[in-house]
Image (cartoon, rainbow, N blue to C red):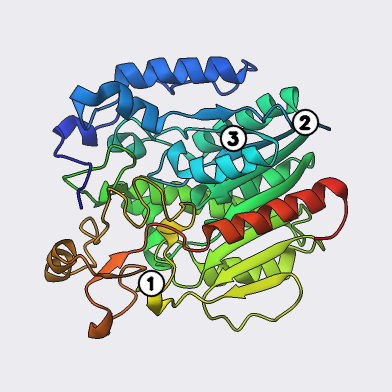
Amino acid sequence: MVSFGSAVADSYYAPTDTALPFDFTSDAPFTEYLDTTAAYLSAHRELIRPKRKQAELELVMPFELDPPERCEGPKKGVLLVHGILDTPYTMRDIGEVLNEACFLVRALLLPGHGTRAGDLLTVTADDWLGAVSYGIRSLKRDVDDVYIGGYSLGGLLAAHAAVAEPEIRAALLFAPALGVTYPFLAHQSSWLRHLKEWLDKNPAPLAIRYQSMTTNAVAQIVELVKRYDDSVGDSFSTPAYVVVTVVDIAVDSDKIVDEFMKRFDHPLSRLEIYGDSDVERDERVLLIPSFLPEQRILNIAHMGLPYRSDDRYFGLNGAYRDCGQYLPIIPNNEVAECQRNDDNWRGELDSTKNKDYLPLQRLTYNPYFDQTMQRVVDFLEAVSTGGTE
């Protein structure tokens, strides 16, 4: 098993000394956004593997997938938004399923991402909201029906958009960051960022995503959560398909479940939960077992939700092995044993102290991906026809 990261220069941890990669207040076509972003990345990305520059750039680029020629009827489009530290590649597997279901698929590269981890020192919540607003405007011009989907931070941004844009037909929210894990630390981040720039700083980053987190990035997410809480009101009326995992070290799954039960009142909305939960049972909630001992899966991890099991980087036999080497909460001896062992249990990091399940490797794919996405497609069909699933 290999990692596809390597040591980088100190400049990787310093912000780019330029403006945003694109003017998100413009009404330029999405093709211009793609071209401008490609040129910006070519000029400003701190490369992990300089000898493979073009392949590395293609990994992190925003993308567009036109619907197949067989598709008929009103043109549907979905904007997909990745999570913190990620790139549009995170949304590729989901996007390909939606594209086969006759959607025009567009995936953004959020500001502060895809260039160097240091750009998360200066990015703001408004930068992210502006990028999503541009994506929605561009989609409105080209399709009849607009949908939005997001993962983690992207799910929070998608929820913001659904509240602000009544024309959005439905939202797909994969572990949306409506609340964050370790809330005390998170809520101190607004002032702590002026004293401590980095919460963790990995010396061997990946080409495809960051593995270092700035305090500022957390502060901006907390700001977005506050704004969402202030704006949503009593009802999240847009139909939504929400997917959460009970054991999650990144987002507060309990808050997401509570939010769904209290505010997501559209009859077509659905909540899919991986793991045990005492949530009130009704026809809109689906509980799915997360302990799969025959696959040596202890539980479903946050990071794996958007990836197929055969993803070339994050799948069962993918190139990347996540042993928590970038997290101070994982003991060094457990990291080393995980990296040596080829028969690890997989799950969410730091979710067990039971030695029967150690060493624990982070589950970086979703064993239920195909089944979940079929339910998502069925949900979207119900929304588009105004019927029931």
- Could you tell me the amino acid type at mark 3? Val
Image coordinates for residue 303, horizontal then vertical, percent: 41, 57
Q: From the top left corner, tell me how far across and down residue 230 is, in percent.
A: 66, 55
Residue 379 position by quadrant: bottom right
Q: Is residue 11 left or right of residue 65?
A: left
The secondary element bearing badge 2 is classed as loop
CA–CA distance in space, label 2 to label 1: 40 Å
Mark 2 vs mark 1, foreground winner is: 1
Q: Which mark is residue 295?
A: 1
Which residue is the site of mark 3? Answer: 132
Q: Report which residue position mark 2 lands on.
A: 75
Mark-to-mark CA distance, 3 and 1: 38 Å
In this rendered view, identify the residue nearer to me: 243 or 185.
243
**Can residue 16 be seen from the camera position used here?**
no
Three-letter amino acid code of the residue under disc 2:
Lys
Rounded to the nearest angstrom, the CA distance separating label 2 from label 3 is 20 Å
Residue in the image at 19% along x and 30% along y: 11
| 54 relative position to 105: left or right | left
